[in-house]
Amino acid sequence: MHGNVIDEKYHLILVSCYFNLESTNTIIQVLQKKISLYKISIYIDRGEAICIGLDKINDWIKNKHSNNIEISFKVNNSSSLFHAKAYCLFSDTSKKGSLVVGSANLTGRGLTDNNGNIEILYNTQDESDIENFCNDLKILENDFMDVSEINTFVADDDYYFKYALIQLGCFVETNDITINAVLQHTYNFNKKGKEESRTDKYKQKGFLEGNGASKNYFQGINEDIETIFIKYNNTYNIDWGKYSIRTKFGHWIPKKILGYLDEIPKEKQKIKECQNSISSDLKSCFTKSKEDMVEEWRELLMDDRWVDHQNITSLEEKNHNNIINILTQETEKILKDKMEYFVSESCLEKLLLRYETFNISFDFANQDEINTFFENLKYNCVKSINSDKVDKKIDAIKEDIKNINDEKPGDQVLEIFNKYNLDINTNILNYCLYLSIKCQNLIFLNWLDTDRFIKIQEELDKKNKAKKDREKATKKN
């Protein structure tokens, strides 16, 4: 886009279906080293803007305004996906500049990463091409809305609304991976071992419950490992159920709240430090773990006869006097492999985070999927509140919403809750979600900021604890 650059101020137009704020910053920074930008006009798909989030976009616009750059941020407002990709830089006075069209979206992989996608782009400095391009955008102006309106929905915006509501949160599932599951060794019992697995002798072995003949020979440092996890993840022991709506797809948690809970450091250096700490702990108890496993394996093999040689072919060739040496070699290999996998980045990240999130990309082909997520979320929400009470007052609530202004809107939403005696102190998230659905307005969920939600939840926890304490005291008396 360098083209006919001269010493004057330029207007940058960015048209893309998929869009990334960081990639946009990259392009702007490169251009500002060579020219002076006075205006940036952006045209993207509404679904993509919803996916990014209005708060992030507003912060980005505010930052650019502080640099004395005029920002126009428009989104396509139609039932079809806006799939255009074009990038134009020109001077309003001289009409000189560059127009680039092609296959690349304004994303890292599409346009700014050195190792990104293979794309085809056509660049022209023809003034008539640039003028025609700008005129075409003006003709399409009625098909666009200002980005500030992306969360204002009308009757025809059913899919946009459902997608926007779901995108205010994310689905969280607890990783089905535990310290014991990774470090345990499972013995392959023979017929005799299986027959005697219900005896007291078996119970005294201390195998992990529900895992067959399994044992974690590093069990003694489980608490130490969890302490390390807590050091690098303040939310390691968070009870997700308190902050979410449970669905069959996992816990749905508003992103504003998740931002408070999700304080896991993403820097590779932090993960490396966690790896080093845990590796040190595992190595410190390796000798004892090895001795314990060798002795138990020997008992199961020779005394109890509950396991066979399994895959240790060397046992068939050696005299049993050498069995300890053979088992020691096998045990070292098994435990070292488990240690290595435990501190691998793929495993450690799952153990450290304890959960994984997933989001759904905006695509009109995903409508059935979005409807399924939405209906299940709504179903679980309705189960938890007195929806009939809300439904009787919903018309009046809709009228009150119209009067909410930009001055402390959160306080005005709270007044609505109080006015209609909605018990948000025991079920704040479900009431906010239900009202958002019934009013087709996201203001209730947007009002639910981190500090307000956590404060209400902590007060509720205190009340519940006090209630349990009173019940215990009553039983004792």
Image (spheres, helix red, strand yellow):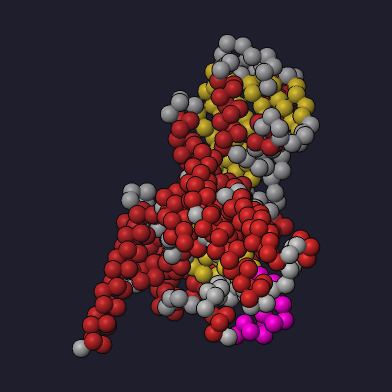
Residue 38 at x, y = what percent?
52, 23
- Seen from the viewer's position, the closer of residues 71 and 175 is 175
Q: Is residue 271 left or right of residue 397?
A: right
Position above or below: 125 against 208? above
Residue drawn at the location 37% of the way across and 60% of the way down: 453
Residue 344 at x, y = what percent?
60, 48
Q: Is residue 229 magenta?
A: no
Position above or below: 371 against 278? below
Position above or below: 33 against 56? above
Residue drawn at the location 63% of the way across and 76% of the way down: 303
Visible residue check, residue 177: no
Q: Quadrant of residue 464?
A: bottom left
- Seen from the viewer's position, the closer of residues 252 and 144 is 252
Residue 211 at x, y = what percent?
60, 73
Q: Is residue 385 left or right of residue 5?
A: left
Total tally of numbered discs in the picture: 0
Instruction: Give the quarter of the figure containing the N terminus.
Output: top right
Residue drawn at the location 29% of the way across and 73% of the way down: 465
Q: Quadrant of residue 448?
A: bottom left
- Seen from the viewer's position, the closer of residues 470 and 85 is 470
Q: Quadrant of residue 327?
A: bottom right
Q: Is residue 188 magenta?
A: yes
Residue drawn at the location 20% of the way across and 88% of the way down: 477
Residue found at the very far left of the displayed protein: 477
Visible residue check, residue 389: yes
Residue found at the very far top of the displayed protein: 7
Q: Which residues are magenta?
A: 187-198
